[in-house]
Amino acid sequence: MGRLRLRRPRGLVEGVSAAVVALAVLVLAARMVTTAGEALKQAWPALLALALLAGAIAAWRIGQAAAVRRRDKERLAGLQITLGEFDAMDDRDFEYALRDLLVRDGWPARRVGGGGDQAADVIGDHPQRGRIVVQAKHTRVGGKVGSSVMYAVKGTAGPAHKADHAVVVTNGTFTRDAIAWGERHGVHWVDRERLRRWAESGTALHGLLGLSGRSRTTRFKRAA
Protein backbone atom coordinates (compact mmCIF):
# COMPACT_ATOMS: atom_id res chain seq x y z
CA MET A 1 0.00 0.00 0.00
CA GLY A 2 1.38 3.44 -0.94
CA ARG A 3 2.05 6.15 1.61
CA LEU A 4 -0.65 8.68 2.30
CA ARG A 5 0.56 12.05 1.11
CA LEU A 6 -0.91 15.38 2.14
CA ARG A 7 -1.08 18.05 -0.51
CA ARG A 8 -1.38 21.73 -0.14
CA PRO A 9 -4.87 23.18 -0.61
CA ARG A 10 -5.54 24.35 -4.11
CA GLY A 11 -7.57 27.38 -4.64
CA LEU A 12 -9.44 29.70 -2.32
CA VAL A 13 -12.19 27.27 -1.40
CA GLU A 14 -9.84 24.51 -0.30
CA GLY A 15 -7.71 27.04 1.62
CA VAL A 16 -10.71 28.37 3.52
CA SER A 17 -11.88 24.81 4.27
CA ALA A 18 -8.48 23.87 5.66
CA ALA A 19 -8.41 26.98 7.81
CA VAL A 20 -11.85 26.20 9.20
CA VAL A 21 -10.80 22.63 10.07
CA ALA A 22 -7.62 23.89 11.78
CA LEU A 23 -9.59 26.44 13.77
CA ALA A 24 -12.07 23.78 14.84
CA VAL A 25 -9.23 21.59 16.06
CA LEU A 26 -7.75 24.48 18.05
CA VAL A 27 -11.12 25.30 19.60
CA LEU A 28 -11.67 21.65 20.56
CA ALA A 29 -8.18 21.42 22.13
CA ALA A 30 -8.78 24.64 24.07
CA ARG A 31 -12.11 23.31 25.37
CA MET A 32 -10.44 20.05 26.44
CA VAL A 33 -7.74 21.95 28.33
CA THR A 34 -10.36 24.17 29.96
CA THR A 35 -12.46 21.15 30.96
CA ALA A 36 -9.44 19.36 32.40
CA GLY A 37 -8.44 22.46 34.33
CA GLU A 38 -11.93 22.84 35.80
CA ALA A 39 -12.01 19.16 36.74
CA LEU A 40 -8.61 19.47 38.40
CA LYS A 41 -9.74 22.61 40.21
CA GLN A 42 -12.73 20.78 41.60
CA ALA A 43 -10.77 17.65 42.47
CA TRP A 44 -7.61 19.17 43.98
CA PRO A 45 -8.83 19.04 47.63
CA ALA A 46 -9.37 15.29 47.27
CA LEU A 47 -6.04 14.84 45.49
CA LEU A 48 -4.28 16.86 48.19
CA ALA A 49 -5.93 14.75 50.88
CA LEU A 50 -4.81 11.55 49.13
CA ALA A 51 -1.26 12.88 48.81
CA LEU A 52 -1.16 13.80 52.49
CA LEU A 53 -2.55 10.39 53.45
CA ALA A 54 0.06 8.59 51.31
CA GLY A 55 2.80 10.72 52.86
CA ALA A 56 1.55 9.98 56.36
CA ILE A 57 1.45 6.23 55.66
CA ALA A 58 4.97 6.31 54.21
CA ALA A 59 6.27 8.27 57.20
CA TRP A 60 4.57 5.83 59.60
CA ARG A 61 6.13 2.83 57.84
CA ILE A 62 9.57 4.44 57.89
CA GLY A 63 9.15 5.21 61.59
CA GLN A 64 8.04 1.65 62.33
CA ALA A 65 11.00 0.17 60.46
CA ALA A 66 13.38 2.48 62.30
CA ALA A 67 11.84 1.51 65.64
CA VAL A 68 12.20 -2.19 64.83
CA ARG A 69 15.86 -1.70 63.88
CA ARG A 70 16.47 0.27 67.08
CA ARG A 71 14.84 -2.40 69.26
CA ASP A 72 16.79 -5.15 67.49
CA LYS A 73 20.03 -3.21 67.97
CA GLU A 74 19.30 -2.69 71.67
CA ARG A 75 18.36 -6.34 72.11
CA LEU A 76 21.47 -7.61 70.36
CA ALA A 77 23.77 -5.13 72.13
CA GLY A 78 23.21 -6.94 75.41
CA LEU A 79 22.68 -10.41 73.99
CA GLN A 80 23.79 -13.23 76.28
CA ILE A 81 23.11 -16.91 75.71
CA THR A 82 23.93 -19.59 78.24
CA LEU A 83 25.35 -23.01 77.46
CA GLY A 84 22.17 -24.57 78.77
CA GLU A 85 20.16 -22.55 76.25
CA PHE A 86 22.46 -23.66 73.45
CA ASP A 87 22.11 -27.30 74.48
CA ALA A 88 18.31 -27.01 74.30
CA MET A 89 18.35 -25.63 70.73
CA ASP A 90 18.01 -27.56 67.52
CA ASP A 91 20.44 -27.13 64.63
CA ARG A 92 18.50 -24.30 63.00
CA ASP A 93 18.10 -22.29 66.22
CA PHE A 94 21.80 -22.77 66.94
CA GLU A 95 22.68 -21.23 63.58
CA TYR A 96 20.39 -18.24 64.13
CA ALA A 97 21.87 -17.73 67.62
CA LEU A 98 25.40 -17.63 66.18
CA ARG A 99 24.23 -15.14 63.58
CA ASP A 100 22.82 -12.87 66.30
CA LEU A 101 26.06 -13.06 68.26
CA LEU A 102 28.02 -11.99 65.20
CA VAL A 103 25.66 -9.05 64.70
CA ARG A 104 26.14 -8.12 68.35
CA ASP A 105 29.89 -8.03 67.74
CA GLY A 106 29.56 -5.72 64.73
CA TRP A 107 29.51 -8.28 61.91
CA PRO A 108 26.43 -7.82 59.70
CA ALA A 109 25.60 -11.50 59.24
CA ARG A 110 23.05 -13.81 57.70
CA ARG A 111 22.16 -17.46 58.11
CA VAL A 112 22.77 -19.48 54.95
CA GLY A 113 22.73 -23.02 56.34
CA GLY A 114 20.73 -25.71 54.62
CA GLY A 115 21.06 -28.07 51.70
CA GLY A 116 24.04 -27.21 49.51
CA ASP A 117 25.45 -24.66 51.96
CA GLN A 118 29.02 -25.75 51.13
CA ALA A 119 30.15 -25.93 54.77
CA ALA A 120 28.85 -22.47 55.67
CA ASP A 121 25.92 -21.96 58.02
CA VAL A 122 26.45 -18.26 58.79
CA ILE A 123 28.30 -15.61 56.78
CA GLY A 124 29.22 -12.19 58.15
CA ASP A 125 30.87 -9.21 56.47
CA HIS A 126 32.80 -6.65 58.52
CA PRO A 127 33.97 -3.38 56.94
CA GLN A 128 37.47 -3.72 58.43
CA ARG A 129 37.86 -7.41 59.25
CA GLY A 130 36.45 -8.84 56.03
CA ARG A 131 34.23 -11.87 55.57
CA ILE A 132 33.77 -14.64 58.12
CA VAL A 133 32.30 -18.07 57.41
CA VAL A 134 30.92 -20.02 60.36
CA GLN A 135 30.17 -23.73 60.31
CA ALA A 136 27.83 -24.58 63.18
CA LYS A 137 28.01 -28.04 64.76
CA HIS A 138 25.28 -28.46 67.34
CA THR A 139 25.77 -31.69 69.25
CA ARG A 140 24.70 -33.44 72.37
CA VAL A 141 26.59 -32.56 75.53
CA GLY A 142 29.94 -34.31 75.39
CA GLY A 143 29.87 -34.73 71.63
CA LYS A 144 33.08 -34.18 69.67
CA VAL A 145 33.75 -32.61 66.28
CA GLY A 146 36.37 -34.39 64.19
CA SER A 147 38.93 -33.36 61.60
CA SER A 148 36.63 -34.05 58.64
CA VAL A 149 34.64 -30.92 59.47
CA MET A 150 37.84 -28.86 59.42
CA TYR A 151 38.76 -30.31 56.02
CA ALA A 152 35.35 -29.41 54.57
CA VAL A 153 35.44 -25.84 55.86
CA LYS A 154 38.99 -25.31 54.66
CA GLY A 155 38.07 -26.57 51.20
CA THR A 156 35.15 -24.20 50.63
CA ALA A 157 35.69 -21.09 52.76
CA GLY A 158 38.04 -19.41 50.32
CA PRO A 159 37.10 -20.81 46.89
CA ALA A 160 33.31 -20.93 47.37
CA HIS A 161 32.64 -18.11 49.82
CA LYS A 162 35.61 -15.73 49.35
CA ALA A 163 36.10 -15.73 53.12
CA ASP A 164 38.86 -14.05 55.09
CA HIS A 165 38.16 -16.11 58.24
CA ALA A 166 36.77 -19.62 58.73
CA VAL A 167 35.39 -20.74 62.09
CA VAL A 168 33.82 -23.97 63.30
CA VAL A 169 31.59 -23.50 66.36
CA THR A 170 30.16 -26.26 68.54
CA ASN A 171 28.45 -26.54 71.88
CA GLY A 172 30.53 -29.69 72.37
CA THR A 173 34.26 -30.20 71.97
CA PHE A 174 36.83 -31.00 69.29
CA THR A 175 39.13 -33.95 68.92
CA ARG A 176 42.82 -33.24 69.41
CA ASP A 177 43.48 -33.97 65.76
CA ALA A 178 40.79 -31.51 64.66
CA ILE A 179 42.26 -28.72 66.82
CA ALA A 180 45.79 -29.42 65.64
CA TRP A 181 44.75 -29.51 61.99
CA GLY A 182 42.75 -26.30 62.35
CA GLU A 183 45.65 -24.52 64.02
CA ARG A 184 48.00 -25.52 61.19
CA HIS A 185 45.65 -24.59 58.35
CA GLY A 186 43.98 -21.42 59.62
CA VAL A 187 40.56 -22.82 60.51
CA HIS A 188 39.53 -21.30 63.84
CA TRP A 189 37.57 -23.32 66.38
CA VAL A 190 35.16 -22.43 69.15
CA ASP A 191 34.47 -25.23 71.61
CA ARG A 192 32.15 -25.27 74.59
CA GLU A 193 34.42 -23.15 76.80
CA ARG A 194 35.12 -20.59 74.12
CA LEU A 195 31.41 -20.50 73.29
CA ARG A 196 30.66 -19.70 76.93
CA ARG A 197 33.14 -16.82 76.88
CA TRP A 198 31.72 -15.54 73.60
CA ALA A 199 27.99 -15.89 74.23
CA GLU A 200 27.65 -15.81 78.01
CA SER A 201 30.49 -13.54 79.12
CA GLY A 202 30.19 -11.15 76.19
CA THR A 203 33.72 -11.44 74.74
CA ALA A 204 33.66 -10.40 71.08
CA LEU A 205 34.50 -13.24 68.69
CA HIS A 206 37.27 -11.30 66.93
CA GLY A 207 38.86 -10.62 70.31
CA LEU A 208 38.45 -14.21 71.39
CA LEU A 209 40.09 -15.60 68.25
CA GLY A 210 42.46 -12.74 67.49
CA LEU A 211 40.85 -11.87 64.15
CA SER A 212 42.29 -8.67 62.75
CA GLY A 213 42.06 -7.00 59.34
CA ARG A 214 41.96 -8.43 55.82
CA SER A 215 45.72 -8.31 55.31
CA ARG A 216 46.28 -11.01 57.90
CA THR A 217 43.65 -13.32 56.47
CA THR A 218 44.59 -13.19 52.80
CA ARG A 219 47.06 -15.94 53.68
CA PHE A 220 44.09 -18.15 54.53
CA LYS A 221 42.51 -17.57 51.11
CA ARG A 222 45.74 -18.19 49.19
CA ALA A 223 46.32 -21.40 51.10
CA ALA A 224 42.85 -22.73 50.26
Image: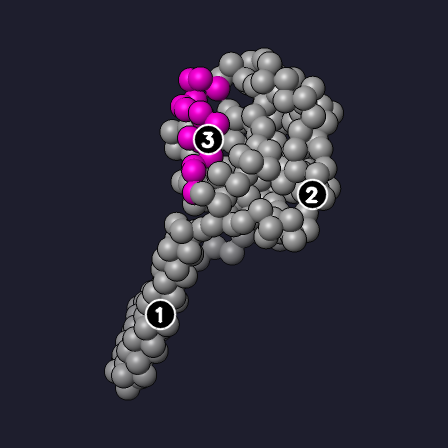
Which three-letter amino acid code belongs to the residue tagged 3? Leu
- In the image, 155: left or right of 51? right
Residue on which the image places disc 3: 208
Evaluate whether residue 91 shows in this view.
Answer: yes
Residue 41's tag is none
Circle 2: element type: loop
Which three-letter amino acid code belongs to the residue tagged 2? Val
x, y percentage for residue 162? 55, 26
Who comes first in sequence, dot 1 or dot 2? Answer: 1
Residue 60's tag is 1
For image coordinates 68% across by 47% down, the residue present is: 91
Q: Which corner quadrant holds the C terminus?
A: top right
Q: Is residue 215 magenta?
A: yes
Whole-number angstrom distance, CA of label 1 to CA of label 2: 47 Å
Residue 141's tag is 2
The reply to whether callout 2 and callout 3 are in contact (CB within 8 Å) is: no
- Is 131 drawn above or below residue 177 in the view shown? below
